[in-house]
Image: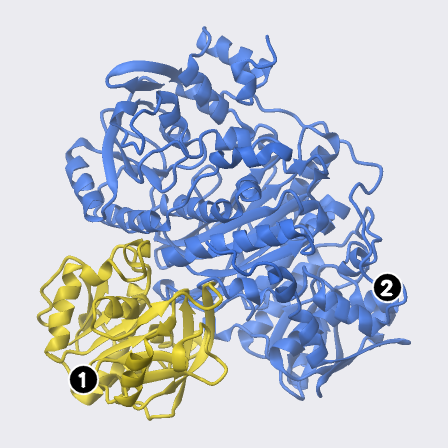
Amino acid sequence: MSENSPHRELGLTDHEFDLICEKMGREPNGVELAMFSLLWSEHCAYKHSRKLLRNLPTEGPRVVMGPGENAGAVDIGNGYSVAFKVESHNHPSAVEPFQGAATGVGGILRDVIALGARPIAILDSLRFGEPDTERTRYLVDGVVRGIGHYGNSMGIPTVGGEIYFEPPYEQNPLVNAMCVGLARTDEMVRAAAAGAGNKVVLFGSLTGRDGIGGASVLASAELDEGDDAKRPTVQIGDPFEESKLLECCQELLAEDLLVSLQDLGAAGLTSSAGEMASAGGTGIDIDVGLVPLREADMEPFEIMVSESQERMLAIVEPDKVDAVLALCTKWQTASAVIGEVTDTGNFRILKNGETVGEIRVEDLVDGCPLYDLEPEEPAEWTYPNRVDIAADASPSDIALALLGSPSIASKRWAYEQYDSIVGSRTVHRAGTADAAVLNIPESNRAIAVAIDGNGRRVACDPFQGTIEAALECAANLAVVGAEPLGVTNCLNFGNPEKPGVAWQLGRAVDGLAEACRALEAPVVGGNVSLYNETPQGPIYPTPVVGMVGELPDPEQAAGENWREGDRIALVGPFDPSLAGSELEKLRGQLGKGLPAREIAPVRAAIELVREAVRAGVVRTATDVSDGGVVTTLAELAIASGPGCKVDLEPVLVRRECSAEDALFGEGPGGFLLAGEAAELEKLAGQGVDLELIGEVTGNEIVAVAGESRVEILVEEARAAFDSLEERIESDQAGLTH
Amino acid sequence: MIWGVLQFPGSCDERDALNACQIASGGGPGHARLVWHEETDLSGLDGIVVPGGFSYGDYLRAGAIAGLSPAMTAVAEFAAEGGPVLGICNGFQVLCECGLLPGALLTNERTRFICRQGTLVVGESDSPFLAGLEPGQEISIPFKHQSGRFFAPPEMLEEIESRGQVAFRYAPGQNPNGSLNDIAGITNEAGNVLGLMPHPEHAVEAFSGSTDGLAIFRGPALAGAGA
């Protein structure tokens, strides 16, 4: 076989091609080969991750829909469910940041819309290189604008998220978008085709040549130098079309006109129609001559694999077709009957009635071989280290350096570009609490949503780092009084065919499974993004965890506003260490390994904090996160106004750690609470470690640990914390979309 | 008081406005309904809200297409008869586009979308929407828009100012977009049409942090206005 065999250019291996021929009993024609190449791509078939994912806990009393549907869903009472999912759009965003990010948001919204839910919130988890390169600033600007463009125009609030800046993401940024939707449980639809003779209706935008091969060419291979040439494989988003599509879908479902509904995402019609037929155990006929086109001369294979955005596919009973088409016309969205459900078990492609391709649905959707990973733990730390702080920096200098460190510094310049309040549900948005809180009067409660994943710590120890990501989400929910209901995740890793990456992936999934079991938080959906690497190497292994929880009373959620005279307590089994910390990064001393920590005591602390917040006995609650105790205290002071004075002697004694560990060390299981002394003292003696470490006072942040002393003005801390905007925007004037 | 809230393809704050109208009127769905952009019969409605969003995608210019819609022709007649009309954000842009209000809204000075809680100062306009507010009073209302920079040629601006048509200004130091004279909202000469760039419909429930927006929705009933 020659080097440039068509199947290789489309990303299939020789073995996979042989298997296709064997299953079909002949060589596939061009249309069929194109369809196989997409559905057998990593992006669609999860061929390197599916076996691992079987270890995740997926069941729980509140689960309404689990993995395998367009999104997961959990019951929130009174007949309502919350649907949610996180998905990546990394490679498109690396090539064209504005459209890549915009269509990433558009795609995840459609997953939730397809369940019959109305999207009520978006969160984003973003990773870039250090902001001192022009490329990073270009990517940040485009991605943030792209997310805002799509979400704002759709009228879906972007309520939270996180942005980390680390060198391994320089060439391969991560753009993970999470959508949360609300639906009446009995009106949710599944994506299975049913009923031979039922019609297949395509509606939404016209089908064009954009995004052809996106899933195979872009999403399932490493990025390299010539990637600007792949720009045509990036789709173009049109939020106005999607806004109409959303309202149209809501009305179609309210009128009970659909048998099932599916969005068109990666691999376009091929995957939507194929997966609907597979889920329903049916066959399906699609006539490409009936598809409304943007360009008249498109080939059948192009129509079948086009990734044009803002399209949906519905299965409709014949006598309801007219009503469906009429509603589409009302919403000014194109629609057409393009085929029908059959009982043949075959996916047949026709052009004006003539068959141009025919594949068994089973072979196409479930026939792709699943691969075992060949993991091998790397002997050493394989990522770059760079020094960003003077060796003789004083504790106060370190505190200011941490507050100004890009991953910790304020991201207000980004989240103020997002409409965080449309929909009238937002109680807490980004910047006012660790988790977003959304009011759900339909079921007399509120939900809280958090997204987290510190890739650097996962790089140090994939198992412990991933556990920490899940615990961090649960901690973020606890401080607003919420209890976890379900988890979604996006596993962003390098090339799984490389043993080191395979080891990271396996250990991370083990960690996620362990943490979710311990938290009794089932994983109801997710996404895997592999091959995130460039000739400079792989990204940090980055499992991003999204968690949804519930709380009885939205107004009870504690904020970040302590008052002069409040006492401050450090709560939980927090045992700080510099391993994998922000400070170790600034010192260029990162290496393998994180200290192992038990999950059970962390869970106990999470529950204590949640109940304290629900009881309204604390004014401020937050978890100790990146940059350690001092950084977290400084963030509270910046948000609230008054400073604080704390002595970490009890930490030095109880944990037998160094002063630096106590001041700047990181790890799971630490909370800072502020409120009346009497109320805080009541929390002691419940089996969770609790130390009163100081009080809210003055205009300085003073933290003492043995001989070491941090003493900085709140205003200095604020200036450092707000310093990132200027660095990001230094060369952005005049760049507009 | 029964409100009609216009709905264009691409509107996105229409449900929020509907909710605000219902809360302001004492609750209940009977107090407000959506008006589809092709509707021309506004009978039975006492007030109109042209809501925020991106009507028809706003690809030509914010509010340009919506200004020509059948529903807006009916709203112009409603306004001419003295009915209270509130245009919020994109609705303000629409009211300027169809000539019910003077001036125009340009892209923010820094070209970016901006969303933050801010303070407005009530102006001197004689408008039913200000019936529950005192001149100089400060209210907390969210700002969120990408094309909110109020502009008018010097003579027109002078007229707007001298006729007391400035209903709201951004508090000192809070102008988020470069609007002339810190203008956040203006009325027509008669006072019954108000265009406002910030979003009072997002400040009507305690959990959002402010209920200052209610006064604006309650104004017309208080003033005894209505068609």
Comparing B10 with B2, the one in front is: B10
Dot 1 falls on a residue whose secondary structure is loop
Tell me, for residue A234, which label it has, or none. none
A293 vs A229, left or right, is left
Where is residue A720 drawn, in percent x and y? 70, 71
Under mark 2, the amino acid is Ala
Give the residue displayed 45% in from the left and 6% down from the top. Answer: A26
Task: Write down the colour of chain A.
Answer: blue
Q: Are marks 2 and 1 on the same chain?
A: no
Report in which chain the residue with disc 1 lies: B
Q: Amino acid at mark 1?
A: Ala
* Label drawn at residue A390: 2
Height in image: A690 above or below A149? below
Q: Position of residue B76 (x, y in %)?
A: 14, 70
Disc 1 target residue: B190
On screen, residue A563 versus residue A436, left or right, reads right
Give the chain letter at badge 2. A
Which residue occupies the foreground of this view, A213 or A185? Answer: A213
Whether residue A225 is situated above or below residue B2 in the rendered picture: above
Q: Residue at x 27, y 37 (%)?
A: A259
Which color was chain B given?
yellow
Q: Is residue A662 visible?
A: yes
